[in-house]
Image (cartoon, helix red, strand yellow):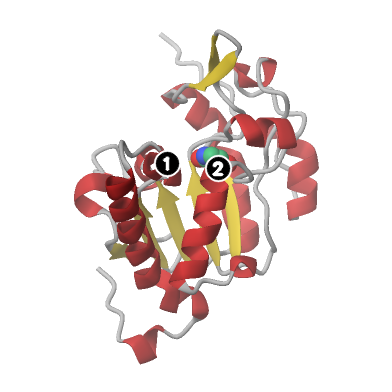
Amino acid sequence: MATRSLPTAAPLVPERPTLERLHTAAARCTACDLYKTGTQTVFGEGERTARAIFLGEQPGDSEDKAGRPFVGPAGKLLDRALEEAGIDRKLVYVTNVVKHFKWTPRGKRRLHEKPNAREIAACRPWLEAELAVVKPRVLVCLGATAAQALLGKSFRVTQMRGQIFKSELAEAIMATVHPSSILRAPDDESRHREMEMFVRDLTNIAPLVRGSEREEGLELH
Ligand code: URA
């Protein structure tokens, strides 16, 4: 039986991509059904010269409305953690594995729903194009969806967070928790502890983002 490959965003990726061209082309993406329920495509944001890409799962409710990644509560927490870790926000490009908000209605609220393998695969060409244009030195996966999309299905953030690997995608790749998992911590004490661990992970990779790992004696796995 002939196999039929499922549609992805690949045919929409411009031949000579720039971030601006990618942003414009992705706005028309219909490679999976999420465009039907999301308000708009939420493409990555940051400078072409950024040294690090931080990769989340998908835009949340605030991002879906604003059309910009990491502008809601999780994004604000990420900004605070970057500052505490001494990473200049201007050196960071933020994006998501899936570029439409996936949600289910719960009363008047729109509840986040995890993207499936088909949606992740359909969206992948956009991420590959972002990586090819930005060519980040450092890639940070936020949460299991991003980590497993780039480091393989068997990657466990709980066991391997904070470890820095060499990769074909960037000089160094690291996975840590998603900032929204810190927001979901059951009490102040655990939220505080989770935030400390998150900042510690980012502090470990900060010398690579700044380009000063030799002085810091950083070792890659
Ligand atoms: N969570 C994500 O993974 N990405 C965003 O842009 C916002 C929240």
Query: On residue 57, which mark appears?
Result: none
Where in the figure is residue 219, as x and y percent of width and height?
Answer: 27, 77
Q: Which three-letter amino acid code belongs to the residue tagged 1?
A: Leu
With 32 as the anchor, is 205 left or right in this view? left
Q: Amino acid at mark 2?
A: Pro
Q: Which residue is at a point 46% across and 68% down the rendered structure image?
A: 84
- Residue at (50, 64) in percent of width and height: 82
Q: Position of residue 70 (x, y in %)?
A: 59, 46
Relative horizontal placement of residue 171, taking residue 31 as reference (left or right): left
| Figure quadrant of the C terminus | bottom left
Left or right: 78, with 214 as reference point: right
**Front residue of this view, candidates 58 and 127:** 58
Residue 13: where, in percent of width, then height? 70, 40
Residue toward you, 69 or 29: 69
Residue 9 appears in the figure? no
Looking at the picture, tell me which residue is in the foreground, 73 or 23.
Answer: 73
Counting from the top left corner in percent of width and height, residue 24 is at 80, 41
Q: Quadrant of residue 165?
A: bottom left
Question: Quadrant location of ligand 1?
Answer: top right
Instruction: Give the number of the disc on residue 183.
Output: 1
Q: Residue reaching furthest front? A: 188
Q: Are marks 2 and 1 in contact (CB under 8 Å)?
A: yes
Mark 2 or 1 closer to N-term? 2
Pointer 2 residue = 73
Element under label 1? helix
Q: Residue furthest left?
A: 159
Quadrant of the image containing the N terminus: top left
Q: Residue furthest bottom?
A: 215
Q: Against 189, is 38 above or below? A: above
Mark 2 → mark 1, Cα distance in angstroms: 8 Å
Residue drawn at (66%, 69%), measured in percent from left and top? Answer: 49
